[in-house]
Amino acid sequence: MSIPAIIVTIILVISAVLLIGIVLLQSGKSEGLSGALVGSSSESFLGKNKSRTWDAKISRATKWIAAVFLICTFVLNLL
């Protein structure tokens, strides 16, 4: 195995572990029975500041880590 392949493999393993951990940290999208009965309003305070919440930050981090994982997988396949 060459040095670049070893480096990409290490990055791939680290990103896989981080992706597993960050997916486990995410909360569910369903709001339960109260969300079904009342409904969710985007006009509330929490709806307006949704991009600043912990869930939004974790969601963005999940997308970036998944992209790194995907790119490392393609690069490793080409090596």
Image (cartoon, helix red, strand yellow):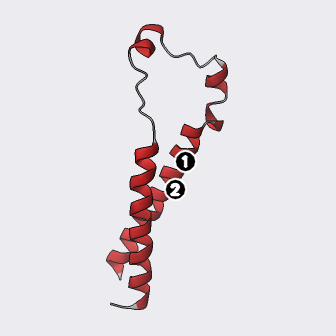
Looking at the image, the residue that sits furthest to the top is 37
Q: Secondary structure at mark 1?
A: helix
Looking at the image, the residue that sits furthest to the bottom is 2
55 vs 7: above or below: above
The span from disc 2 to disc 1 (Cα, nearest Å) is: 6 Å
Q: Secondary structure at mark 2?
A: helix
Q: Nearer the viewer, residue 33 or 64?
A: 33
Give how far across and how far down residue 25 sits, in percent.
45, 44
Residue 52 figure quarter = top right
Q: Give the residue type that dot 1 points to.
A: Arg
- Quickly name the residue at label 1: 60
- Quickly name the residue at label 2: 64
Residue 6, labelled with which disc?
Answer: none
39 vs 74: above or below: above
Give how far across and how far down residue 12 sits, in percent.
40, 70
From the image, which quarter does the N terminus lie in? bottom left
Q: Give the residue type that dot 2 points to.
A: Trp
| Callouts 2 and 1 close, C-beta under 8 Å | yes
Residue occupying the point 40% across, 25% down: 30
Residue occupying the point 39% across, 62% down: 16
Residue 56 figure quarter = top right
